[in-house]
Image: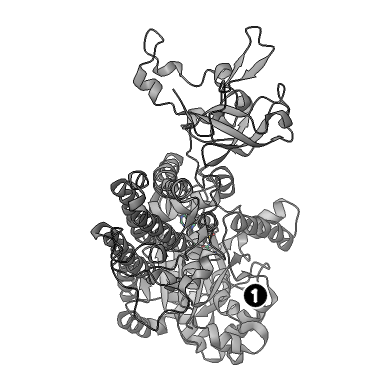
Amino acid sequence: MAKFFLTTAIDYVNAEPHLGHAYEKIAADVIARFHRLAGDDTFFLTGTDEHSLNVARRAQEEGLTPKEFCDRMVAAFQRAWEVLDIRYDRFIRTTDEDHVATVQEIVRRINEHGYIYQGTYAGWYCVSCEKFLNESDLVEGRCPLHPTRKVEWVEEPNYYFALSKFQERLLEHIEKHPEFVRPESRRNEVLNRIREGLQDISISRSTVDWGIPLPIDPNQVVYVWFDALINYVSGAGFGGGQGEKSGKFNYWWPADLHIVGKDITWFHCVIWPAILMAAGLPLPRTVFGHGFINVQGMRLSKSAGVVVDPIRLAEEYGSDAVRYYLMREFSFGKDGDFSIAGLRDRYNADLANDLGNLLNRTLAMIDRFLGGVVSRPIESAPVGGAAGVAEAPGPPGTVAAAGMLPQPDGAGDERDRALRRTVREAVANYRQRMEALELSEALEAVWAVIDDANKYIDEKAPWDLAKSRERRGELELVMYQLAETLRVVAILVSPFIPKAAVGIWQQLGLAGAPAEAGLRSCEEWGGFPGGIRVRRGAPLFPRLEEEKETGRAGGTDGEAGQAGTAVEAGEAGTAGEAGEAGLITIEQFAQVEIRVARVLAAEKVAGADKLLRLDIDVGGEKRQIVAGIAKYYTPEELVDKEIVVVANLKPAKLRGLLSQGMLLAATSPDGKSLALITPERPVGAGAKVK
Ligand code: MSP
């Protein structure tokens, strides 16, 4: 088993986490989950960078010690990562004891190796960047990245790191190892800048006391960047007192991947490797400089009022939706422009329509046509018969038990084979893209499968196959193929949308979890076991209504909306489409699917006087609806009743409950009583009303 150690930049804690921080952590989490899925022993390190001047100032403003202030902010970062499903293995803080010890040990070593000397520093300092700027970097006397804040003139005795001595070795390393700086565009930038020449850098401060004491001069503290970079070595286990003699450190170090923003690639591709060379430690394999997330072309910045709170976003749209949007919409190495409209479009098009529909259609058909059970075609279909399952099973000796027979690769017709080919190619493409950190392109590969599977349904028309007994074998093959495709899709999307992946898995009726199944189980067709009963549940991605409509579905008068009654709420023939005379055409009416449903169970909705939650059977399909009839009916009197529902209404949420349809009822002219519409004599659940 290979090991894979990846890290993110550690965030400054002077302000709450923003979408840019979240973007990086989500990407790293996706990569970590992918490596776990691929079977690698994975270690994912993230954390916070706390010894900054900004922190000391903010703490003072709030009357707290810097450490107290950091504790509070760290909680906010950790909560954000929890909400966004970021599963790190260690959260390192630069105030952690083992990190402090590691920084001191590394400084001591570099000093012993002769790369630290004393000098005086004088220059312009940007507190927001925590770095000195050259006169030529200033724009109208200010930092170009933080124009709202004045740069400060700082003059102090301090210690220097002899960066210039590493120019040749760095050039040689980067030239020899094309994978060291990625993407390629950043590599070129870095190489060009190194060729312009390197200057020694100051690594201590004498005017500040919030920081790690410099072991060679206790009157100074270590410069925040020098301190921060070393977190990667501390996090790998250097700081337990044993340095590189520690088994843990030796196992994990060097890091396989540092993920950082493009603004700090210089620190990671030049200063960091030079520190490691000076300390006699091996260099990381790859530094990837990702792009920036902007809003309407503007940089996220609290001071400029451009902020997007990732927690609120996840609470409103779900963590999967945020993760999916950020990973799919923007190419990992490039900048991107965030917008709510973009997020909603991606959600509706890719998650609700493509993936959500594929799952819902497949499960509904398995329920309706196969009594909810997927069987392996090879077990039930006549070999070589009219069902078209012609080929013999796999090579002799490979089969352990009848239930585990791999499905022969030649089963079915050309279209069946084409779907399997699409899946096989996509899995290979996905693996390649993920290894190349082309995250958006990896998702594209998965969506090629989803698109093809949706087309496969349309072309195979299982509803026609279900009409004749002789075609049962074909029908079973189609449903098996779809179930197996969805199993593979659940595994492939699990690094990106972990909650939904588990949801798909459970609705398919599979045991365990997609993340445990592993990538290898996608590489061989036929992992879906036969004889499984699917467990259809609530849609994983209910469509988001137009923004102007969301108030109706989720707002205070939601009870009178979809969950109310058609007669009361006037939902069935909406006035907007009615034409000038208020009339609708027969075609418009035909778009409304009205069916008889049997009430299986009913109960009151806690905290909502008017609402009842009903489980109903719409002809072999179980659904939940929420209706505003609690004042007129008790739950008991509804059970077993045949009612009439609008079956093709977009699902909506009421009081957090999904309502998958609307029942019909009539209200008396004085508005005091209400009666459910029921068939005049029993006709059976699923009967169509016209
Ligand atoms: N503390 C330093 C990093 C030290 S690493 C040894 C730092 N902190 S930061 O809070 O300013 O940024 C943390 C990470 O978030 C960086 O990789 C940075 O590039 C990234 N991002 C900050 N704003 C961003 C966007 N708007 N978009 C994408 N990533 C951005 O730098």
- Residue at 39%, 56% in the rendered image: 476
* Front-lying residue, 412 or 420: 412
Q: Is residue 385 left or right of residue 46?
A: left
What's the image's color scheme? Answer: one colour
Up the image or down, 488 lies above or below 646; here it is: below
In percent of width and height, residue 587 lies at 34, 21
* Dot 1 amino acid type: Gln
Location of the C terminus by quadrant is: top left
In percent of width and height, residue 306 lies at 50, 43
Mark 1 vs ligand 1: CB below 8 Å: no
Regarding mark 1 in the picture, which secondary structure is present there? strand
Q: Crowding at label 1, few (<14), some or many (≥20) Cα neighbours within 10 Å?
A: many
- Residue at 66%, 77% in the rendered image: 100
> From this viewpoint, is residue 162 visible?
no
In percent of width and height, residue 275 lies at 49, 81
Q: Is residue 58 left or right of residue 226?
A: right
Up the image or down, 186 lies above or below 453; here it is: below
Reading the image, the residue beneath label 1 is: 220
Up the image or down, 570 lies above or below 333; here it is: above
Labels in figure, total: 1
Q: Residue furthest left?
A: 414
The image quarter in which residue 191 lies: bottom left
In percent of width and height, residue 484 lies at 42, 61
* Front-lying residue, 450 or 250: 450
* Front-lying residue, 290 or 127: 290
> From this viewpoint, is residue 89 visible?
yes
The image quarter in which residue 616 lies: top right
